[in-house]
Image (tube, rainbow, N blue to C red):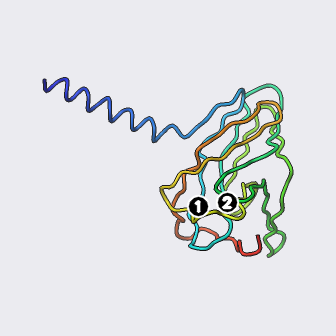
Amino acid sequence: MKISTLLFGVIVAASFSNVALAHEYQLGDLRIDHPYARATAPGQPAGGAYLEISNQGKSGDKLIAVASPAARSTEIHTMSMEGDVMKMREVGVIDIKPSEKITMRPGNGYHIMMIGLKQQLKAGDKIPLTLTFEKAGKLEVSVQVEEMKAGTHTMDMSKH
């Protein structure tokens, strides 16, 4: 009886560890890793989501749309520093060349902007996000909301 109880415990623990580690998705030749968002302050109207897209195929594709029921609208943005000024703008699509990896992260480069958040994003929450690719089609991923880490940049979202 003890061996079966121990075996059951190991199987359950392994199942939960796979769920925790299963934060990657595959759609055709595209691999999407670690979709996450940063926790937001109460009343903050917008937030960013980040992920990594790897094209493991021999032909390019494009991320052409993003959507989430967690926000009034969801857009693909890029952010860059021009001198001492941080500039953020919407981009219609992201080209993903063969063997290319696009890494979205806070502070610079691409990110997904969720405008008109329907509720505060709290650490531990999971929100659905649908990615639409020109060739590969649609994929729904689960975005995990993570704590804002000390020393990370915050953006003024009040203008969105």
Say left or right for 28 vs 149.
right
Residue 121, by quadrant, is: bottom right
Q: Residue furthest right?
A: 92
Residue 132 locus on image (x, y percent): 76, 40
Q: Are marks 1 and 2 in contact (CB under 8 Å)?
A: yes
x, y (%) of residue 25? 61, 35
Location of residue 40 with respect to 134 vertically, above or below: below
Q: Residue at x 84, y 47 (%)?
A: 93
Q: Residue furthest left?
A: 1
Looking at this view, is 50 or 139 the one in front? 139
**Residue on which the image places disc 1:** 38
Label 1 sits on what residue type?
Arg
Residue beneath disc 2? 48
Disc number for residue 149: none
| Residue 32 rendering spot, x and y as whole percentages | 65, 39
Q: Quadrant of the C terminus?
A: bottom right
- Closer-to-camera residue (28/120): 120
User: Badge 2, how many Cα within 10 Å: few under 14, some, many 20+?
Assistant: many
Left or right: where 118 falls relative to 138: left
Check the picture and name the quadrant holding the N terminus: top left
Callout count: 2
